[in-house]
Image (cartoon, rainbow, N blue to C red):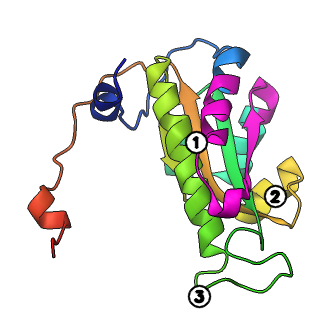
Amino acid sequence: MELQNILQQRRSIRKYKQQPVEKEKIEEMIQAAIYSESWKNSQTPRYHVIQSKEMLEQFKKKCLPEFNQKNIADAPVLIVTTFVKDRAGFQRNGSPDNELQNGWGVYDCGLANQNLILKATELGLGTLVMGIRDERAIRELLEIPVQETIVSVIGVGYPNIEPSMPKRKTIEEVSTFY
């Protein structure tokens, strides 16, 4: 599949087939994320993969608001994305390289997540990125170290719907040429 087709085909999926996702496909998605660029090659994004039915149930109830629980009710996989704090955007001695500081960790995590999501699309999987979640509950349930900042939760599975593309802004609306 060509990149342009993948970009145009990708959608936020809120209904999934009752079909498990092969571990190999999850690993391919994470490998695609690993290939993303990062601040001084710091490679700070981390992926916490939830697949067991018991953990999925616990996570959904404890860590997500009701509307997001509904959005990913059938998702057989959830991936919590994080990044290691105080590395991207910082010098080795710990001093910040610019005013964004840990903003670079979020940026790098977003770049990696985009690779992961596009790879999922190529593999025939659907995803939904969620930013509204309970950070404390996630950290406690998954025992995520304090050195990692939690960025998002991504639902993954085989789509059971084919949503149409929402209206997109034009080049003129989003860009300025000098």
Q: Secondary structure at mark 2?
A: helix
Q: Kindly check if marks 2 and 3 are in contact, taking CB atoms under 8 A apart as contact.
A: no
Say which residue label 1 marks: 154
User: How far apart are the alpha carbons under marks 2 and 3?
Assistant: 27 Å
- Provide the residue designation for mark 3: 99
Indicate the quadrant where residue 102 lies: bottom right
Please give the name of the residue rendered at 35% of the width and 29% of the height, measured from the top-left corner: 3
- Name the residue tied to disc 2: 139
Q: Amino acid at mark 3?
A: Glu
Q: Is residue 86 above or below residue 20?
A: below
Report the front residue among 159 and 43. 43
Is 136 rendered above or below residue 121?
below
Point out the image quarter for the N terminus. Answer: top left
Residue 176 position within the rendered picture, expressed as x and y whole percent measured from the top left: 16, 72
Residue 51 in percent (x, y) is at 74, 27
Residue 163, given in percent of the width and then of the height, sits at 28, 29
Q: Is residue 82 left or right of residue 157?
A: right
